[in-house]
Amino acid sequence: QLYLTSHKPVLRFAAIRLLNKVATTQPLAVTTCNVDMESLVSDPNRNIATLAITTLLKTGSEFSIDRLMKQIGTFMTDIADEFKIVVIDAMKLLCVKFPQKYSVLLSFLSEALRDEGGYDFKKSIVDAIIKIIDTN
């Protein structure tokens, strides 16, 4: 948690990447860091900001989804496909966790499908859409 507020970007990146991986399997263990992760959402390093948002999506509540989705949409075109796929993977978890938010998730994914990106990115979007359809 100390590294999340470090002045060195590499330490912030390492901390948020580790928390992101832990949040995939143990989201409750990471929720104590949500306040510090909120400040990373506006980090000038887009990779750090992306990981912060996806980690918050994994650990956050239903009420924070809309706000985080809007923030993700503003810089999806500025990040590499690797991090776009991380965002889409977070969407897959959200559709299972909050099935009533499917319309927001489908809207975001359909918008992302129109953006530029490689095969793996587009495939992850289609997989997420299929998962949402199967869930609902």
Image (cartoon, rainbow, N blue to C red):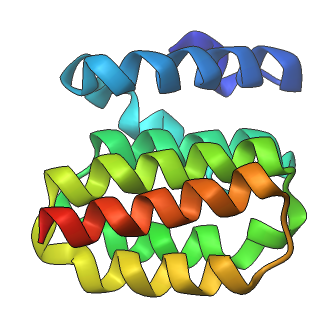
Q: Can residue 51 be seen by looking at this rendering? A: yes
Q: Does 115 sit left or right of 103 as displayed? A: right
Q: State which quadrant residue 102 falls in.
A: bottom left
Q: Does 77 sit left or right of 96 as displayed? A: right
Q: Is residue 73 above or below residue 134?
A: below
- Name which residue lies at 84% across and 71% down: 77
Q: Is residue 121 above or below residue 105?
A: above
Q: Does 109 sit left or right of 48 as displayed? A: left
- Name which residue lies at 65% across and 77% down: 112
Q: Is residue 111 above or below residue 124?
A: below
Q: State which quadrant residue 45 falls in.
A: top right
Q: Position of residue 55 (x, y in %)?
A: 46, 38
Q: Position of residue 7 (x, y in %)?
A: 83, 24
Q: Does 35 sit left or right of 125 as displayed? A: left
- Name which residue lies at 71% across and 15% down: 14
- Name which residue lies at 57% across and 12% down: 2
